[in-house]
Image (tube, helix red, strand yellow):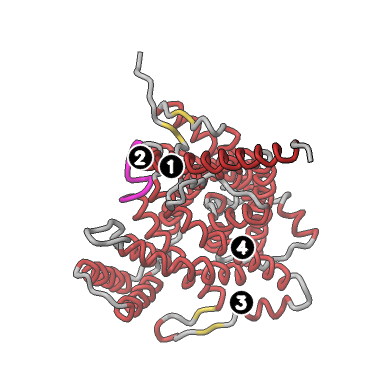
């Protein structure tokens, strides 16, 4: 009989990992709220008498035609601004691989399997619906993505926070999800290649890598080079966001002697607010404006392409992530954290059905030649994400008191040394400090008891 394992799934994070996670998700939460506001603004703009002006702005072209960059505003948002988003995703992925949850193959196996199943199941749901309904298979990748910023915005709106273990699980799922989304875009949505431009982009990436290895510093070196690499990648036929990912993966995400933060973490800290607070919301503003009339909503649930997207996000994501997690935990014999239950995993899996940003991008790429169908697929992404958000909100609210209790335990710092007490249980100095604190409190209470007793004696003494 095999020896029992003491490995815990959704167990406590290390203190550095917890601090990094809190900082990253704080920015993403603010960005997610801005993303939500931008999406609402786009929907309002596109469904009022000013809808023509929305289309006019979307389709307004700007840029040097001689360099092949005479693009519409919507195109600049999708290919240009999202390159910043994918640059941050590349750094995040690199950090997870070398210093985060994915550095240990055994620990990484479970969230990676969950993420893969969470992408495969929606694709299968979409394929099944469109096979039965004689729809187009071109949109199979649309419901496979998870939008971490939008998911966190939902948590902020409903007033629910997650224990750090669940937040880390959600972030790791999103990181792996982004990796596979990048691969899908690179492999399946690459047009006819311009090998001269592609060679130039690769040469630029080599220069970028060499400059990093030589410890050359200065934004005035890297930003112009990054723009050249992006432009060459765009003209090569490979989706331009791949340039952002490649540059992000090249940054060093491990610390050396004397460094408090690695260069990758430092740059991510600088660029993440730009990505979450500006690039992604602007993409949403110029991509989420679709008709939401009664007829359009009815069509979403009656056409196989759009129904496949909705069911992929709502049903496929939840079943895929939950089923993959359960199977992986069973076969790796990883025990679930006793403070959490499997319904908590299902709630997070449902939350991962919010597939806004990358799903919209893949929808634009998959149906680029059909403007009407592109709009319908975008509407399906919005509706599917909304249903997933409502479902997850209900499930998470059922456990909100438990989460509040766990978060309070995680954040308690009775000795006020800046380190949560839960991380100091094996530190003798902590217990000495706590003993001194309790002894001081005990002395104070003894003095109060003595004073209270003396006051009562005085009151009882006859006048």
| Residue 120 visible within the image | no
The residue pinned by badge 3 equals: 58
Please give the label number shown on residue 33.
4
Using a 10 Å C-alpha cutoff, classify the residue at mark 1 as few (fewer than 14 neighbours), some (14 to 19) or many (20 or more): few
Mark whose residue sits in front, 3 or 4: 4
Q: Is residue 227 above or below residue 273?
A: below
Label 2 – label 1 distance at C-alpha = 15 Å
Q: Is residue 315 above or below residue 86?
A: above
Label 4 – label 2 distance at C-alpha = 39 Å
Mark whose residue sits in front, 2 or 1: 1
Kind of element beneath mark 3: helix
Image x and y of residue 211, in percent: 23, 71
Nearer to me, 290 or 449: 449
Nearer to me, 429 or 407: 429
Mark whose residue sits in front, 1 or 4: 1
Image x and y of residue 50, in percent: 75, 78
The stretch of residues the image draws in magenta is 98-108
Please give the label number shown on residue 436.
1
Label 1 – label 4 distance at C-alpha = 44 Å
Mark sitting earlier along the chain (3/4): 4
Image x and y of residue 17, in percent: 40, 49
Kind of element beneath mark 2: loop
């Amino acid at each position: 009989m095999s020896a029992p394992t003491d490995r815990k799934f959704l167990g406590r994070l290390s203190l550095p990992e917890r601090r990094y996670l809190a900082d990253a998700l704080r920015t993403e939460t603010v960005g997610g709220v801005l993303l939500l506001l931008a999406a609402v603004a786009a929907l309002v703009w596109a469904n009022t008498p000013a809808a023509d002006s929305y289309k006019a702005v979307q389709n307004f072209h700007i840029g040097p035609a001689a360099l092949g960059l005479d693009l519409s505003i919507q195109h600049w948002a999708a290919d240009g601004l999202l390159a910043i988003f994918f640059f941050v995703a590349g750094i995040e992925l690199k950090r997870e691989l070398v210093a985060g949850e994915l550095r240990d193959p055994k620990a990484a196996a479970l969230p990676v399997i969950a993420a893969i199943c969470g992408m495969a199941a929606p694709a299968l749901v979409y394929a099944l619906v469109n096979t039965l309904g004689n729809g187009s298979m071109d949109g199979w990748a649309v419901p496979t993505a998870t939008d971490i910023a939008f998911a966190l915005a939902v948590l902020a709106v409903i007033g629910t926070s997650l224990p750090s273990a669940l937040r880390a699980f959600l972030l790791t799922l999103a990181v792996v999800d982004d990796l596979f989304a990048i691969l899908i875009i690179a492999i399946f949505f690459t047009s006819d290649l311009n090998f001269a431009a592609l060679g130039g982009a690769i040469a630029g990436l080599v220069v970028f890598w060499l400059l990093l290895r030589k410890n050359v510093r200065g934004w005035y070196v890297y930003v112009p080079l990054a723009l050249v690499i992006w432009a060459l990648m765009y003209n090569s036929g490979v989706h331009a966001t791949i340039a952002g990912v490649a540059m992000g993966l090249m940054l060093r995400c491990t610390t050396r002697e004397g460094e408090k933060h690695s260069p990758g973490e430092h740059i991510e800290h600088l660029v993440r607010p730009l990505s979450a607070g500006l690039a992604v919301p602007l993409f949403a503003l110029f991509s989420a404006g679709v008709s939401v009339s009664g007829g359009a909503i009815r069509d979403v649930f009656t056409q196989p392409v759009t129904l496949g997207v909705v069911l992929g996000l709502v049903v496929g994501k939840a079943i895929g992530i939950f089923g993959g997690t359960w199977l992986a935990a069973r076969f790796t014999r990883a025990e679930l954290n006793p403070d959490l239950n499997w319904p908590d995993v299902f709630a997070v899996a449902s939350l991962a059905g919010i597939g806004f940003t990358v799903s919209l991008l893949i929808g634009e790429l998959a149906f680029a030649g059909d403007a009407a169908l592109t709009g319908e697929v975008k509407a399906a992404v919005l509706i599917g994400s909304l249903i997933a958000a409502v479902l997850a909100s209900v499930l998470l609210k059922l456990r909100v008191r438990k989460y509040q209790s766990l978060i309070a335990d995680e954040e308690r710092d009775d000795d006020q040394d800046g380190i949560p007490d839960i991380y100091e249980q094996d530190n003798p100095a902590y217990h000495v400090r706590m003993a001194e604190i309790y002894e001081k409190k005990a002395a104070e209470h003894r003095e109060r008891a003595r004073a209270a007793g003396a006051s009562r004696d005085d009151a009882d003494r006859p006048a």
